[in-house]
Amino acid sequence: MSAPSLLRAPAGAHPLRPRAASLVVTAALLLAGCAGGGDAAGPTEAAPSPGADHGYPVTVDNCGTEVTLEAPPERIVTVKSSTTELVLALGAADRLVGAAFLDGPFPPDLAEAGADVPILSERAPSAEVVLAAEPDLVFAGWESHFAADTIGDRAELADLGVATYVAPAACQGDGYRPDPLTFDDVFAHVLEAGELLGAREEAAALVEEQRAALAEVEPSTAGLTALWYSSGSDTPFVGGGSGAPQMIMDAVGLENIAADIDAGWGSIGWETVAAAEPDVVVLVDSAWNTAEHKIEVLESNPVTAALPAVAEGRYLVVEFAATEAGVRNVDAVASLAQQLAEVPLP
């Protein structure tokens, strides 16, 4: 049996149907633009809210979309590692009915909790795949996940009784995009997610733990510059000046040579990299674009091969899943700081 709808739908909207088959058929019609304006359901006597004694209903303004939950969500689908790992870290693994678009394996401290989470899709899932899991909340890492060719429009999902929530650090609209992203933003996101999931105490404890761990990191005071190399061979895709890469480098004490890019990530030319002559290179490691491959690119490119950082192997490595705002960011800072202390510098 599916969980009851937790989203306060617009007046006249139908509640979430109990069977996945009904959801999928309804979604196919809605997302194809075929849903008609049928008669609204008649008024019924309202039942007491199951979350009334636990701080519900909860309403948040999420990237410009108002989201209201009447009770803690019981069937959660997550998209991206950052959102999945946050749900696991908040102790809600038993409510995860599916995850998609993971960037790699879970970190050791979350591996056991995430061992039985169903993986719905290797990439952004379709509406049919998501709705077959009968979620009452879809928690996505990017706004773009809610598109006609993937999960579907947020308003249309709301009409089906499915609440949606985007990681606030990924909001792109004016007044919602963090500029720049800070650890205070990340921690506020954790607390808001805890409020929505009915895990306030867990969220507060997690933030306290992460603040303490971050305070223990001693940033470098050597005035070192760095290239955050995410991907790309002909043209490098690098960490810009307003997202998680910049936030992490600031905490480590590294000056980003691409800080003038007003975005979390962006592209620059290899000649620009060579002219900046970074002291170290931060390599983003992923299964599809490894740190080793990036080293090969740097060492085989005549423009970058002669750079002291490349010639002397001044590389720091960070896992891809830690490069988006989430519960891994503090660990990434600590790891990079330790690696930096071990890199032979002039």
Image (spheres, grey):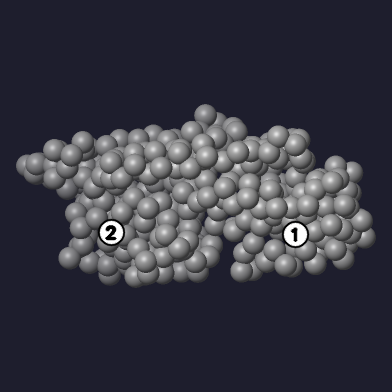
Q: To which quarter of the image does residue 69 belong?
A: top left
On screen, residue 96 versus residue 108, left or right, reads left
Looking at the rendered structure, the secondary structure element under dot 1 is loop
**Are there few (<14), some (14-19), or many (20+) residues within 10 Å of tag 1?**
few
Marks 2 and 1 sit apart, C-alpha to C-alpha, by: 37 Å
Asked if residue 66 can be seen in this view, the reply is no
Q: Residue drawn 63% across and 50% down?
A: 338
Position of the N terminus, as image quadrant, is bottom left
- Name the spot of residue 175 as percent of width and height, x first: 52, 29
Which residue lies under the disc numbered 2?
95
Kind of residue at disc 2: Arg
- Name the spot of residue 20 as percent of width and height, x first: 27, 67
Foreground of the two, 135 or 51: 51
Q: Residue drawn 21% across and 36% down?
A: 55
Which residue lies under the disc numbered 1?
232
Q: To which quarter of the image does residue 230 belong?
A: bottom right
Q: Residue drawn 34% across and 70% down?
A: 116
Q: Residue drawn 26% across and 51% down?
A: 73
Looking at the rendered structure, the secondary structure element under dot 2 is helix
Q: Residue furthest left?
A: 45
Number of numbered discs on residues: 2
Foreground of the two, 19 or 62: 62
Kind of residue at disc 1: Gly
**Are there few (<14), some (14-19), or many (20+) residues within 10 Å of tag 2?**
some
- Name the spot of residue 79 as percent of width and height, x first: 45, 58
- Name the spot of residue 265 as percent of width and height, x first: 67, 46
| Numbered circle sitting on residue 119 | none
On screen, residue 332 versus residue 224, left or right, reads left
Asked if residue 341 can be seen in this view, the reply is yes
Reading the chain from its start, which is encountered first: label 2 or label 1? 2
